[in-house]
Amino acid sequence: MNRYQLIKVKSFFTAILFFAVLSPSTGMLSNTGDEHDRHRAMYLYNLVRNIDWHSQDIVIGVVGESQVTTELESLAKKNTKVTIKTFADFDSIENCDIVFLPNATHPEFYQVQQKIGSSSVMLIVDKKIYVARGAEMGFYIEDDQLRFVVNPDAIKETGIKVSQTILQKAVPIR
């Protein structure tokens, strides 16, 4: 098996494990906020491996206070190529590949969206409605399960290449 085939196999198994954790049929998710935050962090962290980034070192920025930050920092200790930054507000966002905006209000969402502009930054939100309004990806709870949704048009505009596995497993925004 050549190196390219090995990387494809490794990516495939990473994606399977990743989606098994998020799959509602596994029963692995409980309906507690802490578990959902832990799984949001796992999703964000694993997203790094399923996207063709423009750089080798990836920065995930979290706007505001969130338990997801603590979980992400714990996961990032295992990978020196992933850095987690916390931003007190949208004005201080800079040098990120992913910006996660938990618990956003309409004004906050639009301010972060304007701050990011047309750069190659993936905006991930915690409300499905914001994915319909231009965020690339988002989380939502349905039947006490954490799910994720993607906006393929918004992803295409960033120029970031997301693996087909993620696009196929996510719910596309309508």
Image (spheres, helix red, strand yellow):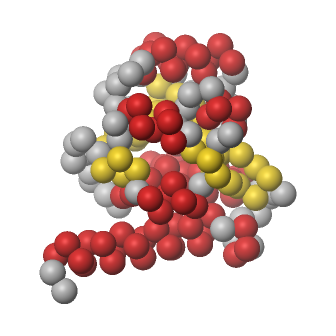
Q: Is residue 53 left or right of residue 109?
A: left
Please tell me which residue is depicted at 27% across the width and 53% down the height of the picture: 80
On the rendered image, what quadrant is the N terminus found in?
bottom left
Give percent across and percent down for residue 104.
66, 26
Q: Confirm whether residue 137 shows in the render.
A: no
Would residue 63 be seen by someone viewing this image from the given angle? yes
Rendered location of residue 134, percent (x, y): 56, 28
Quadrant into which the C terminus falls: top right
Q: Is residue 102 above or below residue 141?
A: above
Q: Residue at x 65, y 13 (%)?
A: 107
Q: Position of residue 48 (x, y in %)?
A: 38, 52
Report the side of 163 relative to 137 (left or right). left
Q: Residue at x 45, y 38 (%)?
A: 155
Residue at the spot 36% in from the left edge and 52% down from the top edge: 51
Q: Is residue 50 left or right of residue 166?
A: left
Which of 67/7 is in front? 7
- Tell me which corner region of the image, top left, top right, bottom left or bottom right, holds residue 137: top right
Residue 24, x across and y down, in percent: 72, 67
Query: Against 21, is 91 above or below?
Result: above
